Image (cartoon, rainbow, N blue to C red):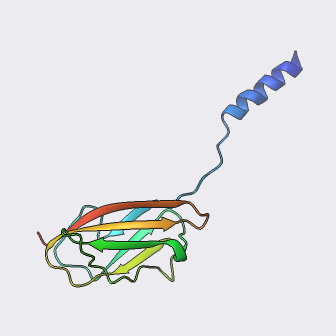
C-alpha cells in the first residue's frame, strides 16, 4: 500500500509543478506613456520591454493621423539597457501619433503591438 501511496503522491505533485517559462518581450512601459497626452512634442521615444531584445530584429515606427511616418528611422536598442528600444522623432505638431513596435527577444520569441499618444491637445 505504501508504494501505491508514494506513486499517487508523486503524480499529484507533478500536477502542481511550474510549466517551463516561455519568455516573450512584452512592452512594460513607454515614454511618452501609452495613451498619454504630452504638452510638448518629445524629441524621441523610449520603449521598455520585459525581456532583453535582439537589436538586429527589433524596430519601431511612429505615424501621424494621416499615416505618414514621423520618426527618424533610427530605432535601436539602448547601449546601456538591452531591454530598451529608442527612436528619434521629427518635430511634431499637435495631434495624435501611433507607435508600432515589433521586437524579438533574445530567445527568438516575437511580439508586436501599437499604442498612441497625443501632443498638445
Q: Please say whether residue 82 is visible from this viewpoint.
A: no
Rendered view: 28 above or below 82: above
Q: Where residue 85 appears, x then y in whole percent?
A: 44, 74
Image quadrant in which the C terminus is located: bottom left
Rendered view: 70 above or below 49: below
Relative placement, left or right, of 56 versus 38 is right
Q: Please say whether residue 13 is visible from this viewpoint.
A: yes
Q: Where residue 100 appears, x then y in whole percent?
A: 35, 66
Q: Where residue 64 appears, x then y in whole percent?
A: 21, 71
Q: Where residue 28 appears, x then y in whole percent?
A: 42, 61
Q: In the rendered image, which quarter is residue 19 located in? A: top right
Image quadrant in which the N terminus is located: top right
Relative placement, left or right, of 13 versus 96 is right
Q: In the rendered image, which quarter is residue 7 located in? A: top right
Which residue shows up at 49% across the image and 62% down it?
50
Which residue shows up at 48% across the image and 72% down it?
58
Which residue shows up at 30% across the image and 62% down it?
115
Amino acid at each position: 500500500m505504501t508504494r501505491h501511496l508514494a506513486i499517487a503522491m508523486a503524480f499529484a505533485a507533478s500536477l502542481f509543478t511550474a510549466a517551463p517559462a516561455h519568455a516573450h518581450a512584452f512592452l512594460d512601459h513607454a515614454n511618452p506613456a501609452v495613451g498619454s497626452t504630452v504638452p510638448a512634442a518629445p524629441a524621441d521615444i523610449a520603449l521598455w520591454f520585459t525581456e532583453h531584445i535582439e537589436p538586429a530584429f527589433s524596430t519601431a515606427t511612429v505615424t501621424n493621423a494621416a499615416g505618414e511616418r514621423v520618426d527618424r528611422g533610427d530605432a535601436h536598442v539602448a547601449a546601456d539597457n538591452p531591454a530598451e528600444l529608442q527612436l528619434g522623432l521629427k518635430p511634431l505638431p499637435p495631434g495624435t501619433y501611433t507607435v508600432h513596435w515589433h521586437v524579438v527577444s533574445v530567445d527568438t520569441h516575437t511580439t508586436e503591438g501599437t499604442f498612441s499618444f497625443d501632443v498638445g491637445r
